[in-house]
Image (spheres, rainbow, N blue to C red):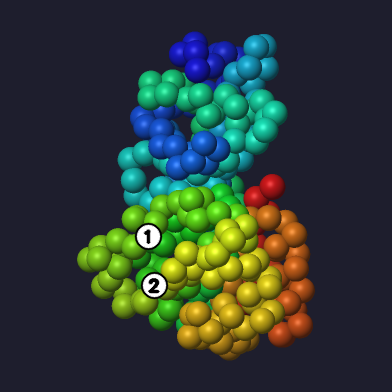
Amino acid sequence: MSSTPPKPAVSPLKASTETVTSVHNWTDKLFSFRTTRPAGYQFTPGQFARLGVTVGEETLWRAYSLTSAAEENELEYFLVQVPGGQFTEQLKNLTPGDPVLVEKFSYGFMTADRFVDGEDLWMLATGTGLGPFISILQDPMVWQKFRHLILVHCVRNAEELAYQELLAALPQRPHLAAGGARLQLIRATTRDAVAAPGNLQGRITTLLTSGALEAAAGLPITVEASRIMMCGNPEMITETREILHQRGLRPCRRAVPGQFVTEDYW
């Protein structure tokens, strides 16, 4: 990608020009990159940032969930290259040292502090919807607030199961382990002819309806104990919401506590 700085027409009150510090390719289409952090930038794990790149005479903006821990000096994003997508094609070609615009405010309401109670936090993700949960699971508050943390990541093929080493190492971080929660990682694939050992096979909604998801976790989903966050494919979110409604679970509202929150990632 050209190292030409973004056009100065963007107000410094709205965004700052940050620098790419590293890029990691998970597959030919899935990648993560990190940037410097704007001075004074604040976010709650689960929120997203708005990024800008300049293409010709135009500055394009898109929203991406933050995967980095809230206290890190850099910001990280996990995304997929969209075929024909002008914005992601620009990002896919980033190299360390390239400029990226970052708006000075964070956005979004899929945060763990939306739940006023509950013992088990279920995090259901498809594809790059995993991103916000990487950030949430690095938050000590979450490990203190819940007894069980269940991350379900569903992808097409096993090669798309990103961040596995980081996730497996989280319980060994002293400041997280001190919270006392137990982390369970449940992986599922939909297009592998045979699921790899330890992985489930099928869509999240299918596994939820059949009971396979709860069996894998060794925990039931109940109104009393379960709090659920969903991020990813809108179809998964719509169908899962319906399944949860049938079980008596309700979404969190501003003035009404509930059992689940969602983020559409498309």
Q: Is residue 257 visible?
A: no
Q: Is residue 182 left or right of residue 154?
A: left
CB within 8 Å, label 2 to label 1? yes
**With respect to residue 184, does 16 lie above or below?**
above
Residue that appears at 26% across and 72% down: 178
Mark 2 burial class by Cα count in 10 Å: few <14, some 14-19, many 20+: some
Q: Is residue 55 visible?
A: yes
Residue that appears at 34% across and 46% down: 72
Residue that appears at 58% across and 59% down: 192
Q: Secondary structure at mark 2?
A: strand
Label 1 sits on what residue type? Leu
Q: Is residue 102 left or right of residue 88?
A: left
Mark 2 = which residue? 183
| Residue 226, horizontal then vertical, whole percent | 56, 81
| Residue 29, horizontal then vertical, whole percent | 55, 38
Q: Is residue 53 left or right of residue 136?
A: right
Could you say which disc has been placed on residue 167 in the image? 1
Residue that appears at 34% across and 55% down: 165
**With respect to residue 191, does 24 lie above or below?**
above
| Residue 263, horizontal then vertical, whole percent | 64, 57
CA separation in Å, label 2 and label 1: 9 Å
